[in-house]
Amino acid sequence: NAGVTQTPKFRILKIGQSMTLQCTQDMNHNYMYWYRQDPGMGLKLIYYSVGAGITDKGEVPNGYNVSRSTTEDFPLRLELAAPSQTSVYFCASSYSSQVEEQYFGPGTRLTVT
Amino acid sequence: AQKVTQAQTEISVVEKEDVTLDCVYETRDTTYYLFWYKQPPSGELVFLIRRNSFDEQNEISGRYSWNFQKSTSSFNFTITASQVVDSAVYFCALSEATDMRFGAGTRLTVKP
């Protein structure tokens, strides 16, 4: 059981470039989440999904897109990278609701210059 | 809107000292859940505890204990006889039906 895996671990983007952060879980969890963590701050929810084909916005969705075509995968897309998107991104999952324990991936450190 | 405040940005203690991390929350819902997560230097978040709004019993797990008081909207976390391995950032979080809000975290450093 790998749990929640994220790739890449680190990435440097130039302003205006695009990229996709990958997230996969092998626990058959229905709920998946993307958070960003800025220095000295807590995590902020970007998007979440309650199951394949269903996604919804969190607290800070602007500049990001997601899709959920399978139970296992929940990629996060940045279309036009901006310096404000420099952050550490965490993917998480939980079995059946947002009020359960969430399992987190190791994070992706993204720098936009 | 829901909000979580961890007023202590950083705490430094010497090994074997007891330490309490404070968490104060705001919510309009009567049903909600509170969490504590640990983020060690490796970066990954690790779940410690979940508490629902109807269960105000304090909980103890080894050297860890949690004090939930609805009257003061607080969910404080105490580590007894701290150890160097407890050094981490600790996050308190609040979840209502569709959202999870994290506090800014408290960085705990335990010195040998």
Image (cartoon, grey):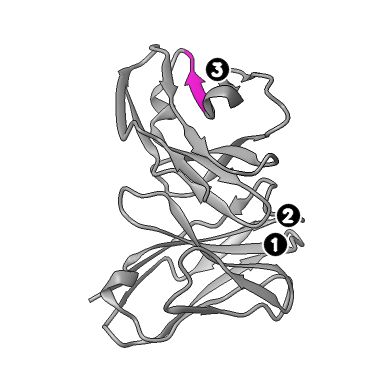
Q: Earlier in the sequence, mark 1 or mark 2?
A: 1
- Do the residues at pointers 2 and 3 share their chain? no
* Residue lying at the far front of the rendered structure: B28
Residue A26 shows in the view: yes
Chain letter for the residue marked with disc 1 in the picture? A
The image's mark for residue B63 is: 3
Q: Tell me the amino acid under the disc marked 3.
A: Arg
User: Could you tell me which secondary element the residue under label 1 belongs to?
Assistant: strand
Is residue A112 positioned above or below B49 on the image? Answer: below
Q: CA distance from mark 2 to mark 3?
A: 29 Å
Is residue B74 positioned above or below B25 on the image? Answer: above
Q: Nearer the viewer, mark 1 or mark 3?
A: 1
Q: Residue at x 43, y 28 (%)?
A: B85
| Residue A50 shown left or right of residue A18 in the figure | right
Marks 2 and 3 in Cβ contact (< 8 Å)? no
Chain letter for the residue marked with disc 2 in the picture? A
The residue singled out by tag 1 in the image is: A31
User: Could you tell me which secondary element the residue under label 2 belongs to?
Assistant: loop
Q: Which residues are magenta?
A: B75-80
Crowding at mark 1 (Cα within 10 Å: few <14, some 14-19, many 20+) = many
Residue B11, position as x, y percentages in the image: 31, 27
Seen from the viewer's position, the closer of residues B46 and B106 is: B106
Q: Tell me the amino acid under the disc marked 1.
A: Tyr
Q: Residue at x 62, y 80 (%)?
A: A67
Crowding at mark 3 (Cα within 10 Å: few <14, some 14-19, many 20+) = few
Q: CA distance from mark 1 to mark 2?
A: 6 Å
Indicate the quadrant where residue A10 lies.
bottom left
Is residue B109 positioned above or below A40 on the image? Answer: above
The residue singled out by tag 2 in the image is: A97
> Most prominent secondary structure in the magenta stretch?
strand
- The number of numbered badges drawn on the structure is 3
